[in-house]
Image (cartoon, grey):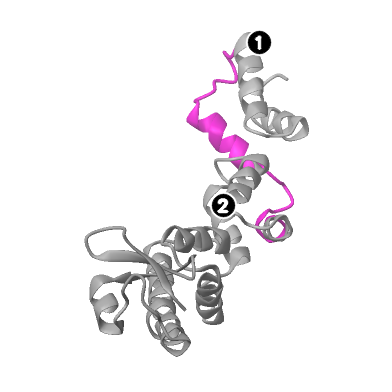
Amino acid sequence: MIVTKVEALTKAKYRVDLDGEFAFVLYKRELQHFGIREGEDLEEKTCMQIRKDVVLKRAKLRAMHLLTDMARTESGLREKLRQGLYPEDIVEDALAYVRSFGYLDDLRYAEHFIESRKDQKSKKEIYALLCSKGVPPEQIREAFESCYPEEGEQDAIRRILEKKRVDPEHASREEIRKLCGYLSRKGFRYEEISRALKAFDIPF
């Protein structure tokens, strides 16, 4: 294989293209160690060694660090590794590595996400947020089933009413109308809003 490009990305990191296609990113000392120079030949054996012993190892460590930094979905972690210019197959191997230790579990992520937000947000809001993070719809639905009690979203609506300090005795029809509109825009269903307001003795 011919090294067709060695392009500086930073003072220390370089993009390497082989036979006209992106291959991997290496540090300057690694270029020197493997004798990589633009226009010269790179043996396939050496290329495989670089991918396995340098690039894949770095991708695995990067994935572990990203998960230690904060909980992530598989989609989110994949995107972060891609941003680091790791080749696609290296990215998938790194994901498989952390997944094998149980560090990557979209269902568990969704359950934790729901538990931490279900007292403030509607199911609709939470569903949209999880979708934006790349959690598969079937796992979101499964997480909802395990995290929501029979009474549904009543706790979340109650907390919002308490936070807004709604006074049942003195609330005007206009204030109630605006409150209902706010809750509706937050994604709460009419039936849930009605139940919560009645529980608060707010005329509806």
Identify which amino acid the numbered label 2 is placed on: Lys
Front residue of 126 and 95: 95
| Part of the protein shown in magenta | 144-173
- Mark 2: give few (<14), some (14-19) or many (20+) Cα within 10 Å: some
Query: In the image, residue 204 lies at what x, y percent?
Result: 73, 20
Residue 159 within the segment the image draws in magenta:
yes
Secondary element under disc 2, as helix, strand or loop, is loop
Query: In the image, residue 110 lies at what x, y percent?
Result: 60, 58
- Mark 1: give few (<14), some (14-19) or many (20+) Cα within 10 Å: few
| Mark in front: 1 vs 2 | 2
Reading the image, the residue beneath label 1 is 173
Reading the image, the residue beneath label 2 is 133
163 vs 42: above or below: above
Gap between marks 1 and 2, in whole Å?
A: 39 Å
Toward which corner of the image does residue 192 lie, by quadrant? top right
- Residue that sits furthest to the bottom in the current view: 45
Q: Residue at x 39, y 70 (%)?
A: 62
Secondary element under disc 1, as helix, strand or loop, is helix
Q: Residue at x 68, y 58 (%)?
A: 136
Query: In the image, residue 4 lies at what x, y percent?
Result: 41, 67
- Residue that sits furthest to the front in the current view: 39
Q: Is residue 72 visible?
A: no
Front residue of 38 and 147: 38
126 vs 33: above or below: above
The mark total stands at 2
